[in-house]
Amino acid sequence: MNFERLPKNILAVFRERKISTSTVVDILDGMGTGNVLTSKIRAINGDEPYLVAQAYTVSWKMVRKGSDILQRQPSTWEQVKAFLVPELEYADGLVYVAGGGELITEAALAGGMSCTYFEKMGFSGVILGGAVRDMKELKMLNMPVLASNPIPTDTQGAYLVAETGTHCLIEHITVHSGDLIIVDANGVAVVPASAIVEVMEKALAIDSTENTMLEKIRAGERLPELINFTGRI
């Protein structure tokens, strides 16, 4: 693995406080870094997802013919089997993130059996830059699965796995393995690995400030004056 995994206790604090993606993105804007995944990707198997974990990526690409059209090609399974990330023994603190550029909406990048396996490996969730299948099985999972849409078709014969554990592209956003992913009802925020510590420290401080502001608003104080005092909205 070519990135440093965060200590579980650090992720636990962030998770317990349920730091909002809105807070995280405000910080990223101020730092001039980070990204948000397209709103076309949504929770498929639950209404109120929340997760914070480091990305482990799977990069997909379209199957193309080789230079010698008479040469025997690998089987469809050989082309896709790396999507099960056999190089990982356990996935605690990680979220599975897969993409191939533009959203792959006509072929499922994962399904009920593979997502059940990913949950047993310890992944905190699955984020797909495209479709998924087997909704009945997905709704039995405890971890959130985010995708663009359900569809019964799989990828075999049409797409192959280019690489795992490096980076993947979801529309115009590149997600690197080791990036911090935060998911809540607002969407998906991507924090570059190099900015994780600073973003987490700032987010925890801002969360405390904003919780205090909300308490004061509920008690009848005026928001404009609070904003002038705290610099937060």
Image (cartoon, rainbow, N blue to C red):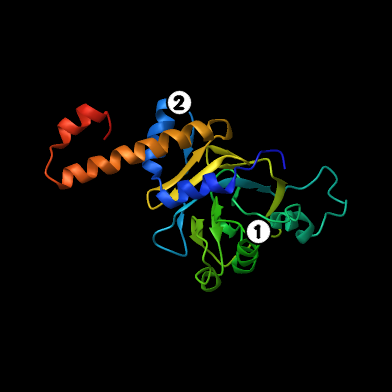
Q: Is residue 211 above or below residue 72?
A: above
Image location (x, y in percent) of residue 147: 51, 56
For the residue pair 81 and 102, the one nearer the viewer reads as 81
Q: Is residue 194 above or below residue 162?
A: above
Identify the disc placed on residue 19.
Answer: none
Relative to 172, is 92 on the left or the right? right
Residue at the limit of the structure toward the right, as seen here: 71
Identify the disc placed on residue 155.
Answer: 1
Relative to 224, is 96 on the left or the right? right
Q: Residue at x 76, y 61 (%)?
A: 77
Q: Residue at x 41, y 37 (%)?
A: 203
Q: Is residue 195 above or below residue 186?
A: above
Image location (x, y in percent) of residue 213: 23, 40
SS for callout 1: loop
Mark 1: few/some/many CA within 10 Å (<14, 14-19, 20+): many
SS for callout 2: loop
Say which amino acid is labelled 2: Gly
User: Can the viewer see residue 38?
Assistant: no
Identify the disc placed on residue 32.
Answer: 2
For the residue pair 57 and 209, the one nearer the viewer reads as 209
Mark 2: few/some/many CA within 10 Å (<14, 14-19, 20+): few
For the residue pair 41 and 166, the one nearer the viewer reads as 166
User: Can the viewer see residue 29?
Assistant: yes
